Amino acid sequence: MGEKRKGVAGKGGSKSIDSNSIRFSQSSVNGSAEITESMIKNGWMGEPIDVVEMPDGVYTTIDNTRVAAARNAGIDVKANVHSYNEPLPQEYIDRFTTKNGIPSTWGEAIQLRIGKQKASFRNNNPMGGWNLDNQH
């Protein structure tokens, strides 16, 4: 775990990344069982997820459920990698705005999401956590 920049360039700017080398920005997810079953049968389907390369060089995901499902299925994820200071597209700003702030970069979006988690998660995992408390 925690290997830096482990990914293979793919088409369209996405990479194939080991699901175990991506941290979570949330402490739990819902709806992963059905996605896991699909991934076991069909592999990765759909668009790449968004991950952010954090200041320590490790990726943290915005799309926690699909990373959890990929881990359970034992497959890599397809991801668009964003730098920490890369501007957040306008259409994502409302999604990641909290009472603690309005994000302008992908890094700020991750930090605000982590900040919304329970105290034990956010205090112990300031750049994202390796494990989930719950998967449903």
Image (cartoon, rainbow, N blue to C red):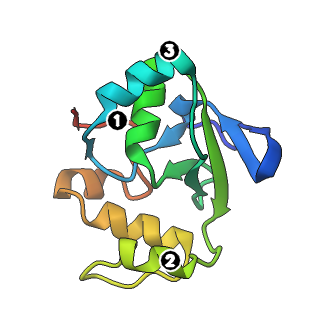
Res. 131 mark: 1
Q: Secondary structure at mark 2?
A: helix
Please tell me which residue lies in front, 2 or 114: 114
Q: Residues within 10 Å of mark 3 (few under 14, many from 20)?
A: few
Mark 2 or mark 1, whichever is nearer to me: 2
Q: Residues within 10 Å of mark 1 (few under 14, many from 20)?
A: some
The answer to which of marks 3 and 1 sits earlier in the sequence is 3
> Which amino acid type is shown beneath numbered disc 2?
Glu
The residue that label 2 is drawn on is 91
Mark 3 or mark 1, whichever is nearer to me: 3
Residue 30: quadrant of the picture: top left
Question: In the visual, does 136 lie left or right of 4?
Answer: left
The residue that label 3 is drawn on is 41
Farthest residue to the top: give it.
41
> Which amino acid type is shown beneath numbered disc 1?
Asn
Q: CA distance from mark 3 to mark 2?
A: 32 Å
Q: Secondary structure at mark 3?
A: helix
Whether residue 70 appears in this view of the structure is yes
